Amino acid sequence: MVKANFILTKSDFIQYQNCPKSLWLKHNRPDVYPAGSSSSFLVKLADEGYEVEAYAKKAVSQYSDAGAYNFQRDFLTSDGLYARCDIVKSNPDGSVDIFEIKSSTSVKDDSSHSHLKDAAFQVVTAQRAGERVGKVWIVHLNKGYVRSGDIDLNGLLTFADETVRVKALLHETQAEINTALGFLRRETIDENSCSCRYLSRANHCDSFDYFNPSIPKPSIYSLPRLFGEKLAAFVDEGRFDLASICPNEVSTQQSLIVKAHNEGNPFVDKVEIRAFFAQLKYPLHFLDYETFLSAVPIIDGYGPQEQLPFQFSLHVLQEDGRLEHSEYLADRPMKPDDLVKALRDAIQPTGSVFAWNKGFENTQNKNMGKQLPHAKDFLLDVVDRTVDLMDIFKTGYVDVGFDGSTSIKKVLPVLIPELSYQNLKVKDGGEAMEAWGKMIALTESAEKNKMRQSLLEYCKLDTLAMVRIYQFIDRLMK
Ligand code: SF4
């Protein structure tokens, strides 16, 4: 049954625009709605929002008419709309100006998320609550800002007057809100399928399994980049099981997953793996960085939403099988001079450098080269020597247990089940970022030391996992 007193918030409205059914489930069947745990990355995003909000408040507090500004003003309407506006300014003519604060570096207006639509929801709610809305502002971070000393509020924030663009959306937003309210009040909907059947897995939300209980695992959604007419044809024919797909009906990469599934064995292309191995030079290095992404830059020389590397783990495997480990973890926010120095000391002058998804490590090396010109040549040499271990798992070694993914978090448990992230305090990059953010705020203490150990353990496992995966493939080739 629909709750008589439900309210529609801006977050709900965003969810409704992405998928009415998932919002209906959340409101009407909370007992089966897969709420999921709020990831540490999402928690961090929320914290960043509050941080930017605090700076925006500071900025308006300096205005000569600061008394006209209210922070976090709520609007609730009799038909169930609720808006908490970040800043509301009361004007002498009785109207109000609405300010939406975002931790992005621009006003987003694309198919995945529109800040203008967010603001339009706030305006409609304020209007229905009896307000006359004057101007509408989106406050976001200034992409061109580079920190130098204390935060310069005028340099950090951009106040974009989006009155015209937001008001142009009011008519359609009113209609969408009315449709959303009507949809949510429905007592029943079709709970036995949903439209994402026609979309690749990247588009599915956590409710997919609930709405599609008959789809097996693995299924056609384990095939990477399966979309469009081909996916639609399989869905229309009810062919969800991989066993119903012939390898020659899909792309080469997809066909390897089908083969691995149908034959009950991993697909191994020894010719391809041999060619991959031929480019390698000992000693083999296995490198992983952890980075901190902050909305508001925490050190000089950095801008909003710029990544700051704070940690690395490096395993070095010699040709005779000796394995050495080096690591670095910054104790405070600082440019990565010490990190690069530690890397220089640990990395050998020759030999391949493995990364998993090398684009990330290469980007960090190039960016650090820009920040630290004296280390640029060294870092670019590391880039030149970097090889992506993940590449093997695209078409060289494919196990259906990877579930169509080449993420190390999917590959490791299948190949090296005894190495697991499960018992670690820090389990992924998002948690590492959050843990470091907390750690640097602490003074020396047992708690800080525990966090330090957790971060070191996590990053070390990332590179040890690469070593073990490499050795697994190496043994296979002998
Ligand atoms: S998986 Fe289903 S419920 Fe989830 S977003 Fe897609 S259509 Fe909506």
Image (cartoon, rainbow, N blue to C red):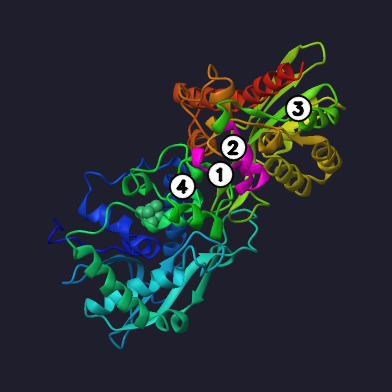
Label 3 or label 2, whichever comes before in sequence order: 2
Instruction: Establish whether ligand 1 lies closer than 8 Å to the Cβ of label 3.
Output: no
Which residue in the protein does label 1 denote? 223
Q: Is residue 140 left or right of residue 327?
A: left
Q: Mark 1 and 2 residues: CB-CB less than 8 Å, in contact?
A: yes
Q: Residue at x 85, y 31 (%)?
A: 279
Please provide the residue range marked out in magenta.
242-260
Earlier residue among tags 2 and 4? 4
Determine the residue positioned at 52% across, 67% down: 108
Q: Does residue 443 lie above or below 56 as drawn?
A: above
Which label belongs to residue 239? 4
Judging by the rendered image, the residue that carries numbered circle 2 is 257
**Residue 462 visible in the displayed image:** yes
The tag earlier along the polypeptide, 4 or 3, is 4
Q: Which residue is nearer to you in this view: 29 or 328?
A: 29
Q: Label 3 to label 2, Cα distance in Å?
A: 16 Å
Disc 4, SS:
loop
Viewer-proximal residue among 410 and 325: 410
- The answer to whether residue 409 of the structure is visible from this angle is no
Q: Residue at coordinates 79% horizontally, 26% vertically from top-left? A: 347
**Looking at the image, in which quadrant does ligand 1 appear?**
bottom left
